[in-house]
Image (cartoon, grey):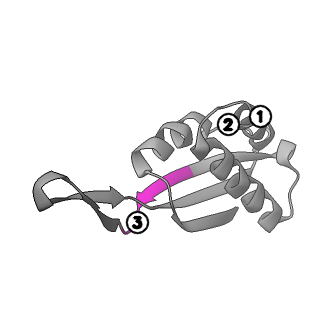
Amino acid sequence: MSKAILRFVRLSPTKARLVAREVQGMNAELALASLEFMPNKAAKIISKVIASAVANGGYEPEEVVITSCRVDKGPVLKRFRPRARGRASRIEKPTSHIYVEVAQKKDS
């Protein structure tokens, strides 16, 4: 089993979790191929983390399965935007932490 972690990504965790749920339990090669054609920003980032997890273990993508793909909430960058009548509204820019674990397939 090998893992890869990408922290403090400027990406909303809720949007990243949609993609992470799709690839969990998939073959790494199939997951990388399907993520390549997804239009989401999260798909490109998660595919890089999966490729890193596969490389960290010294495996080939076709011989491993994604056992866990988890997205946690990171710190939120708080910004302010000026509004009418001298007021200001808060803008929150969320970050996420992405964790991917891959393990070799069990031949059954």
Residue at horizontal 63%, vertical 42%? 43
* Picture disc at residue 74: 3
Q: Is residue 38 above or below residue 65?
A: above
Q: What is the C-alpha distance between the residues marked 2 and 1?
A: 7 Å
Q: Amino acid at mark 3?
A: Gly
Q: What is the C-alpha distance between the residues marked 2 and 3?
A: 26 Å
Picture coordinates of residue 26 (x, y %)? 67, 37
Residue at horizontal 55%, vertical 38%? 19
Picture coordinates of residue 72 (x, y %)? 42, 58
Category of crowding for the residue at label 3, using alpha-carbon neighbours closer than 10 angstroms: few (below 14), some (14–19), many (at least 20): some
What residue is shown with label 2? 26
What residue is shown with label 1? 30
Examine the structure image and report whether residue 23 is included in the region drawn in magenta.
no
- The answer to whether the residues at label 2 and label 1 have Cβ atoms under 8 Å apart is yes
Q: Secondary structure at mark 2?
A: loop
Q: Which residues are magenta?
A: 69-75
Q: Secondary structure at mark 3?
A: loop
Quarter of the image containing the N terminus? bottom right
- The answer to whether the residues at label 3 and label 1 have Cβ atoms under 8 Å apart is no
Residue at horizontal 54%, vertical 59%? 98
Picture coordinates of residue 108 (x, y %)? 76, 35
Q: Residue furthest front?
A: 85
- Which one is in front in this view, the residue at disc 3 or the one at disc 1? 3
Q: Amino acid at mark 2?
A: Met
Question: In the shown orientation, is residue 15 left or right of residue 91?
Answer: right
Q: Secondary structure at mark 1?
A: helix
